[in-house]
Image (cartoon, rainbow, N blue to C red):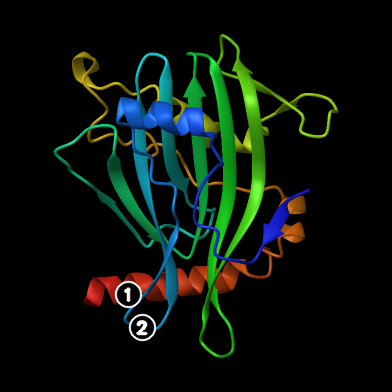
Amino acid sequence: MAQTRTVDLRNGMALDQAERDALQTARIRAEARVNPISQTNGNYVLRGTESGGGTKTLGHYVGFVPLAGIPFIKSSKLTLLGVNSLHRRVVASVMVRFEVFRYRTNYVHAFITLHRASTDNAGKAHVTRQTLFRGKYGELDSDDNATFLSEDGGDDITVPSFLMDGFKAALAGSRCTGKKGLGCQDAGHFESVGTLQLPDTILSALHLRNDATKQAESARGSKAAVAAA
């Protein structure tokens, strides 16, 4: 069952101190924050940044995928001097964030969340996040399928099939070491990932079925505002 919290939840997965220290030592920066931004037409949309990279034994990567029928409003490649950092910036009214932390070569944490921007009757912006999948201490097999320990002590869990393309793109990003192993730069692991079609049961549970037309219209209006700017 998807978990919903309607508060400002822009940060990604919770890493422990040793994991954060290892990323800092390796100089890997994955920007998981999803930021609400106001456009000139008065709509609130979201901005996310594909980012991260890896070494042989450690990696952290974040990328974003649009929902079917609600395309990105804008997608811009970023060119930076540094490595293992920012790669692409996307803007959308709805987006799914894929985040993978890889350690000891074949072990991973995964956090996959859906984010929406909306306004209330007073015009105040809200960001809603729904958790689609969360797994820690997963082990990869030879086909890069991961099996995670269940948080409630039940059966082991795996990434649902409809989320696998995004998961594997984030995993590939966490393995990106760049040319001659000097660091991941100008990456675009999510550029080839298609739009995400959520199962009907999840669309209904998240109340997205009735919102899809409204969100698509908002995206079209925001695209027009970007083109006119």
Q: CA distance from mark 1 to mark 2?
A: 9 Å
> Considering depth in this image, is 16 or 139 the residue closer to the camera?
16
Where, by quadrant of the figure, is residue 5 drawn?
Answer: bottom right
Q: Which residue is mark 2?
A: 41
x and y percent of residue 133 in the render? 66, 40
Quarter of the image with the C terminus is bottom left
Where, by quadrant of the figure, is residue 162 drawn?
Answer: top right
Label 2 neighbourhood size at 10 Å, few (<14), some (14-19), many (20+)?
Answer: few
Q: Is residue 43 above or below residue 13?
A: below
Residue lying at the far left in this picture: please name it: 81
Q: Is residue 12 above or below residue 84?
A: below
Residue at x-position 40% and y-position 76%: 221
Residue lying at the far right in this picture: please name it: 154
Residue at x-position 23% and y-position 32%: 83
CB within 8 Å, label 1 to label 2: yes
x and y percent of residue 74 in the render? 33, 59
For badge 2, the amino acid type reads Asn
Q: Is residue 201 left or right of residue 103?
A: right
Residue lying at the far top in this picture: please name it: 142
In front: label 1 or label 2:
2
Q: Is residue 9 above or below residue 124?
A: above
Residue at x-position 66% and y-position 46%: 132
For badge 1, the amino acid type reads Ala
Residue at x-position 41% and y-position 71%: 220
